[in-house]
Structures are given as C-alpha cells and as structure tokens.
Image (cartoon, rainbow, N blue to C red):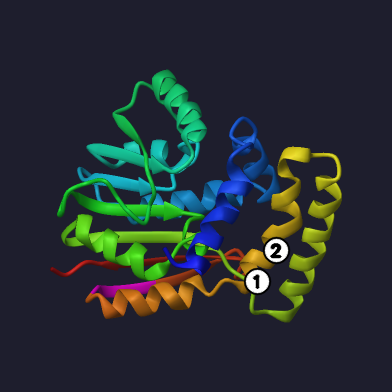
Amino acid sequence: MNEHRDGKKAIALRFFKHVYLTYDIVVRITTFYNDTLWKREIVKLVPKTCDVLDLACGTGILTLLLTDKADRVYGLDIIYKNLIVAYKKKKQLHVNVEFVNADAEYIPFKDNAFDVVTASYLPKYVNAKLLIRECKRVLKDNGIIILHDFVYPRCIVVRYLWHFYFLILKFVGLFAKEWRSIFYELDRVIAESRWVDDVLYELNANGFTCINCRYLTLGTSAIVYARARK
C-alpha cells in the first residue's frame, strides 16, 4: 500500500485505539456540542426507508442516529474496541444495527448494497481515490454519499481563535494521557489535509452527480454529498 496513505491511517489508529471509553463525552465537550449538530445535518440528508452504511462509525454516535431514518444500518470501523462500545449502546436502545470490524478503504460488502454511505471524521485519514471508488461500488444507482470532517478555517480571525483553542487543548493534554497525542497533533493533521478538494475531484472523476459542499460552524467543518451514477 502507498506509504503516505498508510501514514494517515497509522495516525488515526494511534489517535483512537485507546480513547473508546471516553470518546463520546470528550468529543461532545471539545466541539462545544457541535458534533451533535453536525451529525444531525448528516441525518437530514438521508432519505427514509433506506439501507445505510456508516464508515468509521467509532462508538456508533452517528450510526445510532441513522436508525431514525433507515430500515437497515451497518456501522464499520477498523478499531474493534470502538465496536464493543457501540454494540453495548445498540443493545440498550434495541435498534436494528449491525457492526463490522473492517477498513473503510476495503469495504467487505457486495456491489450495489446500500442506498446511502456516510462517514464522519474519516476523510482526512484515508486515500480519497480508494474511498470514493469503494463507496461508488457499494452504492446503488442514485445512491447518496455523505462525508463530514473538520477543515482548516479560511477566515483569518477564525484561524486565530482556532489556533488558540488548540493551545488550550494541548495544555489539557498534559493531564489526559489517552488524549494527549490527539490534542497535540490534530491541529496539524487538519491544517495539512486537503480532503475536501480531494473528495470533490474524485467524485467528479467517478461520475457522481449533484455534488455539494457545505461549510459549517464558521468554516471549521464541512459536509460533502453527492449521488452515484452507475
């Protein structure tokens, strides 16, 4: 596999393999509960009575929200311990979700299996060409892809605030060992990522239509969505 791609994936594994027990509460607090708002925006784009695959589902935050719209929901994540947490939440809520331990760049489902593919916080850690090709393969004709992640803000004022906030997170990281590498390095990962441009290019190259990009919360995150054409 490509060394650069492996490097990005290795960062994700290093970041998240030990934070599964505290992930939900920390992501809510550190995003000032915007994580919930962003995921609700994703759910709004999902039609009712459909089959959905949620890539990099983590502890199942978005996956479980999708059960309000979908007939069948599958959550896929490369970190098995995330899925243990997600499965416990599923049992408490009694919802129709299946979880799969796999790599989002090599989706273990047949062609034309899903109406919708979603992913939150995945794009900056993967190869856009592999991701979009795999999503197109498993999507039905006219199926919807919805990708969300952080982006480096364009507004200079927001950038100053953004960098200051990450200084605060770095200080917090001194006392939160499991989150230290994330708080120390995530700003660099986000600032260096060109995931929006890469995804938009690959969507066009792979024949997707109705391609849209929406920036949220002062341009600190984005949702890209489109329809597959077979």
Residue type pointed to by label 1: Ala
Q: What is the quadrant of the N terminus in the image? A: bottom left
- Residue denoted by label 2: 187
Mark 2 lies on a secondary structure that is helix
Residue 116, x across and y down, in percent: 26, 53
Locate residue 11: give its quadrant. Answer: bottom right
Q: Which of 19 and 43 is in front in this view?
A: 19
Q: Nearer the viewer, residue 49 or 119?
A: 119
Mark 1 lies on a secondary structure that is helix
Q: What is the quadrant of the C terminus in the image? A: bottom left
User: Which secondary structure dominates the residues rendered in magenta?
Assistant: strand
- Residue denoted by label 1: 191
Residue 216, x across and y down, in percent: 55, 65
Badge 1 crowding class, 10 Å Cα cut-off, few under 14, some 14 to 19, many 20 or more, is few
Residue 60, x across and y down, in percent: 45, 37
Q: What stretch is highlighted in magenta?
A: 208-212
Name the side, left or right, on which 204 lies relative to 222. Answer: left
Residue type pointed to by label 2: Asp
* 36 up-or-down from 218: above or below: above
Badge 2 crowding class, 10 Å Cα cut-off, few under 14, some 14 to 19, many 20 or more, is many
x 50%, y 60%: residue: 6
Residue 92, x across and y down, in percent: 43, 19
Q: How far apart are marks 1 and 2 (CA)?
A: 6 Å
Asked whether residue 109 is drawn in magenta, I would say: no
Name the side, left or right, on which 19 lies relative to 43. Answer: right
